[in-house]
Image: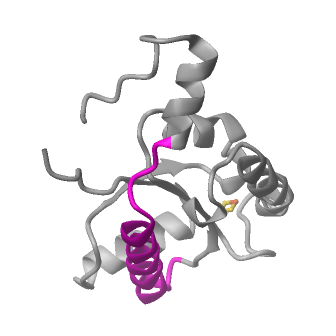
Amino acid sequence: MGERPIRIIAFLCNWCSYAGADLAGTIRLKHRADVRVIRVPCSGRIDAAFILKAYERGADAVIVGGCHPGDCHYVSGNLSARRRFLVMKQLLEFMGIEPERFEVVWCSAAEGEKWAKIVDDVCERISTLGPFRSYKALTASVLGPGREIVTGEE
Ligand code: FES
């Protein structure tokens, strides 16, 4: 059986980074198509559990995106998110998840080109790293043999 395509989940805030990704599509910028976007109201709404769940369900990498610091439509949601994700990165490393599999970006509604470049860069990096299997192995060891998370592939 061949290697499955990479899967990247992006949690993007509605007002800036989602709009930037939308702009990239509207002006037909070419970028890799391995990213599935989940729109959230604000990066401050992205819970650590969302990210762990994405890995658990087979994501090879997670991108979280929000408005640039100072531009959050809910005043300080992205500042809280920035602090949370700093800790999150360390937690993921502690759990054995390579930091390269987690990307935090600030992207405005006018930065379609930036979004396209982020997607290509992350996809390139993850293609080199290969599919992510450690979280699956970890949950198998916690839940017991035969009870690992089933992602529908492999
Ligand atoms: S609304 Fe975009 S980060 Fe808060």
**Residue 60: x percent and y percent?**
44, 52
Asked whether 120 falls inside the magenta stretch, the response is yes
Residue at position x 78%, y 75% in the image: 69
Snapshot quadrant of residue 107 = bottom right
Residue 83 picture quarter: bottom right
Q: Residue at x 65, y 53 (%)?
A: 42
User: Is residue 60 visible in this depiction of the protein?
Assistant: yes
Residue 145 in the image: state x and y as whole percent: 48, 12
Residue extending furthest bottom?
Answer: 113
What percent of the width, then of the height, locates residue 112? 42, 83
Q: Is residue 118 magenta?
A: yes
Residue at x 75% of width, y 57% of height: 89
Position of 29 compared to 67: left or right?
left
Q: Position of residue 104 (x, y in %)?
A: 65, 66
Asked if 153 appears above or below 61 in the picture, the reply is above
Quarter of image, ligand 1: bottom right
Residue 140 vertical placement versus 89 (above, below): above
In the image, 120: left or right of 76? left
Give me the residue at 29% from left, 79% from top.
Answer: 31
Q: Which residues are magenta?
A: 109-133
Image: 60 above or below 103: above
Tell me the chief SS of the magenta region: helix
Q: Residue furthest left?
A: 1
Report whether residue 64 is seen. no
